[in-house]
Amino acid sequence: MANAWFTTAATAQLRASVDPWRPSPQRGRPAGGDAAWVATDSVPNRRNFNCTCAPAFAETTLAGEFMKTAAAPGPRRALSTSLAAPALALTLTLALAPASPLQGAASARILLIAGKPSHPAGMHEFRAGCLLLQKCLEGIPNVSVQVASNGWPTRVVGGQVVDDPTAFDEVRAVFVYCDGGGGHPAIVPERLKLLDSLAARGVGLGFAHYAVEVPRGDPSEAMQRWIGGNYEDRYSVNPMWSPEYAAFPEHPVTRGVRPFSNRDEWYFNMRWAGATNGLTGILVATPSDAVRKGPYVWPAGPYEHVIAASGRPETMMWVLERPDGGRGFGFTGGHTHANWGDPNQRKVVLNAILWMAQVDVPAGGVDSIVAPGDLQQNLDPKER
């Protein structure tokens, strides 16, 4: 059985039925082992979504906009910071990025890939999160957003479930929000090759939370090509903490974003690509020594190389302008579904999705209103 599709049209229908859901391999398992994770064959219907989103619009030019080092007043003042790789000082180039073949296209098709259910209720709610982001982008002119629910887009051919490459036809950007590590759906060789071909055409690629983690080797090299860095097991860390995002670079992705903080599994100490031209830190904060000393979610740590970096700012969200003219971003939050209720977290990710699709970001960013009840919609069926 193939996975479910949702479109932004009011008459959206399921394109196919949903696979029986099962938990993905977890990096960190709670006490009780596999028995603590929930598998279910039930298939939820899409519930009515009452989120009302009110985008504001302005004509802007995105090409060549990079992080500026000159200070500006207020919370939007720029940061000049390292991206926290050992012995790596990030020097941002202000040269214009190469034009992407996608710029100037009449409309933008964006695909959001929501992973299979995992973790207890309220955590890793990939489907609900993607449907929320989709809804909040509904009012953007000339943008079409589809959600592939329950994992990689598939279809049934001759009674067999196979990947559906047509799901990627004419896409301007792909956003992946799923479990990662060795079970990451994008690192299957055929899928990795597909994403490489999309990147070569200038398609934007974005990855959120666990989806930024891939094994070393071909998967990490690909992720560094696509978005500039990745979470590496036993090198990066995943504590629960509350970073204070107080200042932001001048960049389309930070438009309208105000200082914020929420408690989540914010990964840091990413493994960055060897060359960092075009890479801009978006959400940057300095962990306390207590955070660096752990415990981390999994493994508990601590790691001496993380403790030794005391006082160093760390990057929890970043964007990349690739040499091929395409764009990418990584966002390490998103573990706790309730945090999508934070308007600034929501805005910075919505802005990034538009930006990587080569769509003008409104002058004040993408505005959206989400009521508390909206966060209870489209949750995966899990034991409470």
Image (tube, rainbow, N blue to C red):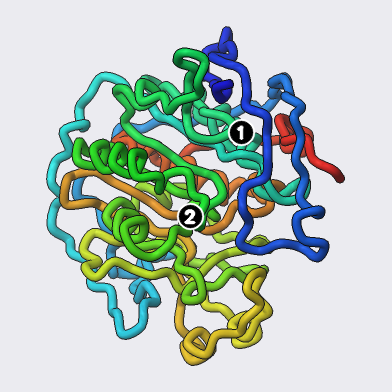
> Mark 2 — residue?
331
Secondary structure at numbered mark 2:
strand
Q: Residue 145 at what x, y percent from top left?
A: 46, 25
Is 18 rendered above or below residue 350?
above
Q: Residue 27's quadrant in the figure?
A: bottom right
Image point (50%, 69%), residue name:
233
Q: Is residue 334 above or below residue 61?
A: below
SS state under label 1: helix
Residue at point 61%, 41% (across, down): 126
Q: Position of residue 94 (x, y in %)?
A: 17, 61
- Rendering coords of residue 80 (x, y %): 34, 73
Q: Nearer the viewer, residue 373 or 68?
A: 373
Q: Amino acid at mark 1?
A: Leu
Q: Pick the quarter of the image with the N terminus.
A: top right
Q: Residue at x 69, y 21 (%)?
A: 46
**Considering depth in this image, is 147 or 132 the residue closer to the camera?**
147
- Three-letter code for the amino acid on which mark 2 is drawn: Phe
Residue at (36, 25) in percent of width and height: 165
Q: Is residue 166 left or right of residue 196?
A: right
Disc 1: which residue: 132
Q: Quadrant of residue 32?
A: bottom right
Is residue 11 visible in the rendered image? The answer is yes
**Among all residues in the image, which is located at the extreme top?**
11
**Residue 54 is drawn in which quadrant?**
top right
Please tell me which residue lies in front, 13 or 195.
Answer: 195
